[in-house]
């Protein structure tokens, strides 16, 4: 079987889990990560749901990434296609709890699922997400990875705050956990470059 096809189930499962984690964070209502703050802000001022705003910004970032001649893959395209709908489905299925304790559980669990999903989809090496591709494009033009990541997420977060996205202690939890969480998850699911069984 084609190596890419063998890796597709892990990629798809990872992206769905990623989107599910975003949906839980939204329903926790205690603040979310920079991009979801932006997507919620966009949904507050348009007919878009949070999920479709995720897709729309993914497409916009992909266009910028392609303009920088960053190489993409099937993982890049499926990232745009699956995460947003998975987020919307979870928001639809999971009611926003009334109790603070239940909302806290969703807020804490969301980034853990996002880290798991990231480890799964990044581990197949089938192309970066569009936002990671933009970071790579900026890095190729002389900016450090750290600076590129910070600048992109700071811009998304600032725009989201202006548009009324939810910020709170969950945002701090996201920022503290997500980097180490992905770093811990990735080795468990990393299958190496495509071409290796």
Image: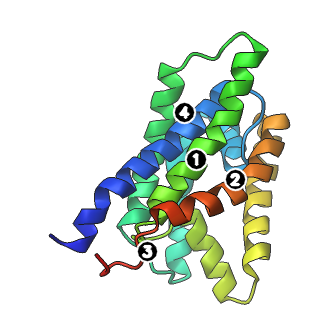
* Residue 118 horizontal/vertical position (percent): 54, 56
* Residue 181 horizontal/vertical position (percent): 66, 54
Under tag 3, what secondary structure? loop
Distance from disc 3 to disc 1, alpha carbons, whole Å, reads 21 Å
Q: Pointer 1: what residue?
A: 114
Closer to the chain start, of discs 3 and 1, is 3
Find the residue positioned furthest to the left: 1
Q: Pointer 2: what residue?
A: 178
Q: Is residue 80 left or right of residue 50?
A: left
Closer to the chain start, of discs 3 and 2, is 3
**Numbered mark located on residue 72 in the image:** 3
Closer to the chain start, of discs 4 and 2, is 4
Label 3 close to label 4 by CB (< 8 Å): no
Q: Residue at x 71, y 59 (%)?
A: 179
Does residue 21 sit above or below 98 in this rendering? Answer: below
Q: Nearer the viewer, residue 23 or 13?
A: 13
Find the residue positioned furthest to the top: 98
Distance from disc 1 to disc 2, alpha carbons, whole Å, reads 8 Å
Task: Work out whether residue 172 can be spotted.
Answer: yes
Q: Is residue 73 left or right of residue 139?
A: left
Closer to the chain start, of discs 1 and 4, is 4
Q: Quadrant of the C terminus?
A: bottom left
Distance from disc 4 to disc 2, alpha carbons, whole Å, reads 24 Å
Under tag 1, what secondary structure? helix
Q: Nearer the viewer, mark 1 or mark 4?
A: 1
Distance from disc 1 to disc 4, alpha carbons, whole Å, reads 19 Å
Closer to the chain start, of discs 3 and 4, is 4
Q: Pointer 4: what residue?
A: 49
Q: Nearer the viewer, mark 3 or mark 2?
A: 2
């Amino acid at each position: 079987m084609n190596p890419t096809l063998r890796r597709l189930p892990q990629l798809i499962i990872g992206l769905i889990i990623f989107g599910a984690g975003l949906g839980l964070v939204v329903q926790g209502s205690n603040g979310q990560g920079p991009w979801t703050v932006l997507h919620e802000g966009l949904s507050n001022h348009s007919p878009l749901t949070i999920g479709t705003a995720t897709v729309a910004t993914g497409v916009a970032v992909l266009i910028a990434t392609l303009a920088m001649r960053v190489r993409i893959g099937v993982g890049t395209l499926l990232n745009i296609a699956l995460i947003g709908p998975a987020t919307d489905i979870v928001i639809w299925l999971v009611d926003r709890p009334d109790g603070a304790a239940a909302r806290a559980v969703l807020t804490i669990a969301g980034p853990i699922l996002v880290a798991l999903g990231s480890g799964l989809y990044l581990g197949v090496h089938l192309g970066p997400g569009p936002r990671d591709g933009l970071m790579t494009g900026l890095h190729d033009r002389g900016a450090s990875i750290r600076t590129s990541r910070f600048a992109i997420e700071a811009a998304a977060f600032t725009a989201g705050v202006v548009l009324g996205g939810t910020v709170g202690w969950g945002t701090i939890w996201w920022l503290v956990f997500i980097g180490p969480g992905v770093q811990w998850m990735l080795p468990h699911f990393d299958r190496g470059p495509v071409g290796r069984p």
